[in-house]
Amino acid sequence: MDILLDWFNNNSDLVTHYILQGLLALLIFFIGLRVTRFLSSLTEKAICNRKVDKAVGVFLSNIVYALGFVATLLMALSQVGVETTSFIAILGAAGLAVGLALQGSLSNFASGVLIIILRPFKSGDYIDAGGQSGSVRKIEIFSTELVTPDNKVIIIPNSSVMSGAIVNYSRESTRRIDLVIGVSYDADLKQVKAVLEGILTSESRILNDPSYTVAVLELGDSSVNFAVRPWVNTSDYWPTYFDLLENIKNALDDAQINIPYPQMDVHLQKN
């Protein structure tokens, strides 16, 4: 104990110096983190105020935060006497090794950059991508977050998003509803067509331009199949889809037009 006290008395200036340097490094680190968070938030707000897609703002703010964190860490280490040039070289070598080990993560990052540049979708769009469907909530550095209609959150790696086909249901302002309605071979086709056209005409959400299509699609095994293809605004797609199916069924019933369905005849043989 006496040896430690003697050493401390003889090196008190040095100990005090390192304590002050350590405290200053911590102060730099915590202030740097606050500044980094502020700049990250400011970047996102600035991009959103320019009416750029929110997902782009989130992506760029994440990059700003990552760069600011690394810069803050290097400044704090430099304050306590760590040689940052050699540290950067070590960090670069370690980064290369980690990069080789984490090729998938780097691929996700590169794919995220491509999503931001090419913009195949934006925040709020309903898409099919990476084998999943949902509305885009945000695009992050390594992944894209979707929300399903039943409020499940799906996180897809960006590389999976960009490696396959992307179906964007929200990009265009209008969509076509494709229905196939089968009727009996005994039905009067002119009457069927008139009933179907009457339903489409009475539906206010169906657009006049482009015009709807009602035509015989095929002569099936047990039914004559009509193609019913009206155009609606994208936001009206599913409500109109559901209402049309119900209204068509009721109208065909009222007109006594049969809709065939599969049937099975069972023969019992008595021994």
Image: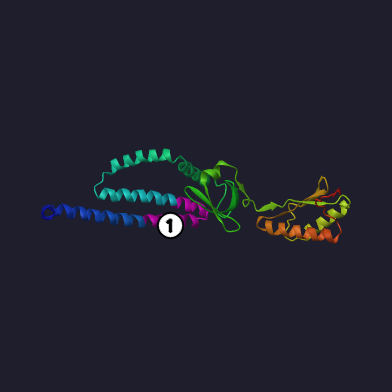
Colouring scheme, one of rainbow, by chain, secondary structure, one colour: rainbow
Residue drawn at (36%, 51%) of the image: 69
- Is 23 included in the stretch rendered in magenta? no
Q: Which residue lies under the disc numbered 1? A: 41
Q: Position of residue 173 (x, y in %)?
A: 65, 53
Q: Residue at the location (37% across, 54% down)?
A: 36
Residue at image location 66% in from the left, 55% down from the top: 234
Q: Is residue 202 above or below residue 99?
A: below
When the figure is inspected, residue 90 is found, relative to residue 203, above or below; the finding is above
Q: Amino acid at mark 1?
A: Ser
Location of the N terminus by quadrant is: bottom left
Q: Nearer the viewer, residue 194 or 129?
A: 129
Q: Nearer the viewer, residue 58 or 49?
A: 58
Disc 1 crowd rating (10 Å Cα; few below 14, some 14-19, many 20+) is some
Q: Is residue 77 left or right of residue 247?
A: left
What's the magenta region? 35-61
Q: Position of residue 187 (x, y in %)?
A: 88, 52
Point out the residue furthest to the front here.
271
Tally of marks: 1
Name the spot of residue 199 as percent of width and height, x first.
79, 59
User: Is residue 253 left or right of 39 when viewed as pictured?
Assistant: right
* Residue name at image x 30 percent, y 49 percent: 75
Magenta span: predominant SS is: helix
**2 lies left or right of 173:** left
Query: Is residue 51 found inside the magenta-colored segment of the image?
Result: yes
Of 101 and 143, nearer the camera is 101
Give residue 267's position: percent from left, percent from top: 85, 49
Q: Secondary structure at mark 1?
A: helix
